[in-house]
Image (spheres, coloured by chain):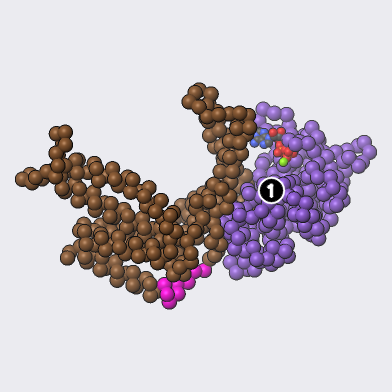
Chain colours: A brown, B purple
Amino acid sequence: MPQALEHSGTSWKGQQLKHKPSLIDRLDPRLRILAAAGFASVVVLSHSFIPLISGLLLALSMAVLAKLALKRTLRRVIAMDMFMIFLIIMLPFTTPVPAGEQPMLQLAGLSASWAGLLHALQITLKGNAVILIMLSLVGTMTATTLGHAMASLRVPAKLVHLLLFTVRYMDVIGQEYKRMRRAMQARAFVMGTNRHTWRAIGYLVGMLLIHSLERSERILAAMKCRGFNGRFYLLDNWQLQRLDYQCGLGWLLILTLLTGANWL
Amino acid sequence: MSVLLQTRGLTYRYPRREPVLDKVDFALHKGDRLALTGANGAGKTTLFHLLVGLKKAKAGEIIAFGQTRRQEADFVEVRARAGFLFQDPDDQLFCPTVLEDVAFGPLNLGKSQSEAIAIAQQTLAELGMAGFDDRITYQLSGGEKRMITLACVLAMSPDVLLLDEPTNALDSQARQRLIETLQGLPQAMIIISHDDDFLAQLANRRLHLESGKLTDPDATPAPEALHG
Ligand SMILES: Nc1ncnc2c1ncn2[C@@H]1O[C@H](COP(=O)(O)OP(=O)(O)O)[C@@H](O)[C@H]1O
Ligand SMILES: [Mg+2]
């Protein structure tokens, strides 16, 4: 399996795995993807507050179990919650007040409904629960492992290759961008809001595209030189262990309970 | 069969330009370590691409391993037997992990997964790169990348090596290691390089590419009277 340290250099530093090893890391990556997907579907389809709140609590405990780095996790969750705040503000006003009910509040001729607020709260709970589970189960594996796991879950090969090649060449293209940017700075280029800047940025982006295209041609040539005939081989022999079966069954039970909680 | 690669009247031009290769004749024999020199943009890389069929010649013929090669299908075998080391290792290391990259060639040659892994590990060990199996390809240093690309090429057990500026961006230690490794290899090779000292330690023949013509700088006049 690939090393845990994923992205070197500066451009992808933010993607390095930073958590301490935990129980979650010992589970099969495929199981983790399936578990996260199952949880997401159950939570997204839930319509009452009991399963949603228990789902969020469960997600929080998984995050603790996965020993997620606190600062980074908060940053990511908050980024998503920024959108949620707008939702909480907007939805009550856009959901019509049901006939015969009192509006929650009236503001400049617009009336806010309780139904809208509850709906917005549900979406917020769902969003947070799903993102926390994703961060703890899927976000704790490297992008390369994720690609391998997707391949062995029979995700279409083209998608997997797209992911793996993106991971592989992100950094290379990032370095190219930096090199060109430095070359511009070395000739006293300063960003401004004028035609000169726009044109220079246009050239920069255009050159970056051309360089990437040329590189992709060279990579294809290199692949052909080594006998590429349309198949891309990934080497791994993951086997489900006892721990995987135990955790998988436990998770299935929890998901069933969560689903059942909708009818409490 | 002592002639491995041979060209007759090989010509290539990019659109709207003077020909970069103009009726080039040359031959690579068993045991040759041919240094190919020439200014930047002289067409050295283009010649390599033609030899393994990545570009199509405008005129002339390429005889590789005893057969004239014309179609894409003819070149599939040539590519397996002529290991091409690209100028930029990043172009060549496209798999996520080192082991996958080195095993990619053998797998394409029809080896089973366990055979391919065994070949890959053995090749890595022979180059002193054992233990790099699980490393992520783009986190290697320049020298390590170069050695891994060499392993990728050698894992296909080629008869000929085409090395395109292999010492580019290597520090002196990595360069020395590469020289020692290459000296120990039995394959015939063509080495493109601007590094005279490197060539002096490796090459036993020299050709110079200029204005589309290949000439032997060591020989007196008649450049056509090379080998063959
Ligand atoms: N894709 C291309 N389109 C047009 N011209 C090219 C292309 N690739 C290379 N050339 C030109 O062909 C010439 C030979 O290139 P190359 O074989 O890469 O030179 P060398 O490897 O000897 O430095 C150069 O002048 C280069 O500008
Ligand atoms: Mg070149």
Classified by dominant secondary structure, the portion drawn in magenta counts as: loop
Give the image quarter of residue A203. Answer: top right
Residue under the point 92% across and 41% down: B219
Residue under the point 30% across and 60% down: A56
Q: Is residue B209 left or right of residue A219?
A: right
Residue A65 sits inside the magenta stretch: no
Residue under the point 70% across and 51% down: B85
Note whether B103 is above or below A114 in the view shown: below
In this figure, which residue is indicated by the disc labeled 1?
A: B86
Q: Tag count in the figure?
A: 1
Which amino acid lies under the numbered mark 1 shown in the image of this protein?
Answer: Phe
Q: Quick check: can you spot residue B60? A: no
Q: Is residue A45 left or right of residue A11?
A: left
Image spot of residue B113 (x, y percent)? 58, 66
Viewer-side residue, A212 vs A21? A21
Image quadrant containing the N terminus of chain B: bottom right
Q: In terms of image quarters, where does ligand 2 lie?
A: top right
In the image, the segment drawn in magenta is A237-244
Image spot of residue B195 (x, y percent)? 81, 45
Residue under the point 53% across and 49% down: A12
